[in-house]
Amino acid sequence: MSSLHTFANVFYPPVGIAHITEETAHLIKHRMAGKDAILLRSSAQPNSHPHLGTVMTMMTAFALGKYFGDYFSVPVSLVYDMLDNSPGEKLIVDGHHYQRSLSDTIVGGRSLADQYTDSFRSIITALSKRSGVSAILRTYTEFQSIPIVRKTLLTILQQRDSFYPIVSPSEKRLHLRFPCPICKYHDKQAASVRIETITETTAVLVSTCYQHGNYSITLSESSPDFIDANTPLRDILQGVLAIEEDGQSNLTSVMLDGGDWSGVWILTVFSAGLAQLGYSRLPVRFFAPVIVDWSGAKFSKSLYLENEAYRYLPSGLIDFSKFMSMYGEAGFDKLWNEAESWVKNPKRFFRNYSVDYFRLILEGK
């Protein structure tokens, strides 16, 4: 689709929650009793320069933080998880998939995670200044070392038969992985990972490297060994961390992710996983609007990286490192103003927007 249509109006039909909610803040007002601060939690994979969808999710997080801070007159901060454990170098040996993480994939003397995090950091710095929301970037290595995260992983291992239908309904396997200490490749599908011993406080896990044979790690609350959890496990762990930290502080946590993680995922993975762990009260969670292409499909960074699916679009929307040279500070302000217009009004917030919608905004139409 190479040309834009001109639309007379933009409509904001009320979805279910908008029928009962005048302002987004009303959805968390009861969770603010006795709390005097808000902690936003969001994340991204630094596997490329961010594209429009990722940037709008980031902007939504900061705009939501500014709105909540003004509404409740409380300080708001953001913990932004840079998922440097995401896939980097990949290879297949005898039908088995192996990969290095972004943090272990070195190009030009620096890891890909560090190189792409630079792009995210510059955007986060700009948004923090606009919103007044302070931000901390956290690596996955730091996240997995938190005692409650490691303790919860151990509990999931102990209850693995109950978790297979939740986090791996097709394979029925927990995707817990850890890199070979020599070459840094790990078994992507955790097919070779097995439990050697497990108790209430400790588990010894063994994996096999295609080059260097068997190696093992120890998982406990305080053990130093790195362990990688795939997306469904990590999402449940994020929920546990939010619940536990809220219970021990004056904070209300608000998780903010892209809208593609809403819907069935929340019911069958996130909520079911927390229920299996014994949690009856879910953390506050919102989802940024999904940016879709002309067909209604999610505007996918990974799809573009694989086959350049969006060659018809301006390059600044696909690779945000080129955005400023194309649209400048005025274009950045237009995106920020759009995000700010979403978060207060449920009719604007709880819906999706097309890439062409943003092209019209950026072109002043």
Image (spheres, helix red, strand yellow):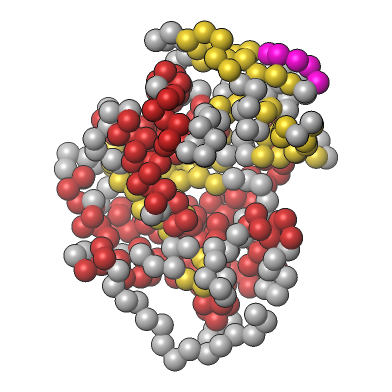
Answer yes or no: is residue 253 visible: no
Determine the residue positioned at 63% across, 73% down.
Answer: 327
Q: Is residue 236 above or below residue 365?
A: above
* Main secondary structure of the magenta stretch: strand
Residue 177 image-quadrant placement:
top right
Q: Is residue 106 above or below residue 345?
A: above
In this rendered view, identify the residue nearer to me: 222 or 203: 203
* Front residue (pair 21, 157): 157
Residue 246 lies in quadrant: top left
Image quarter (top left, top right, bottom left or bottom right) of the N terminus: bottom right
Residue 285 seen in render: yes
Left or right: 141, with 49 as reference point: left
Which x, y percent locates residue 49? 67, 54
Residue 153: % across, % down: 45, 23
The relative height of residue 16 versus residue 218 in the rendered view (above or below) is: below
Provide the residue span drawn in magenta: 211-215
Q: Is residue 214 magenta?
A: yes
Place of residue 259 in the rendered image (x, y in percent of width and height, measured from the top left): 44, 57
User: Left of 97 or right of it: where is 107?
Assistant: right
Measured as percent of width and height from the top left, residue 92 is found at 77, 36
Which quarter of the picture shows residue 307? bottom right
Is 253 contained in the magenta span? no
Residue at screen point 55% across, 57% down: 54
Residue at position x 38%, y 44% in the image:
268
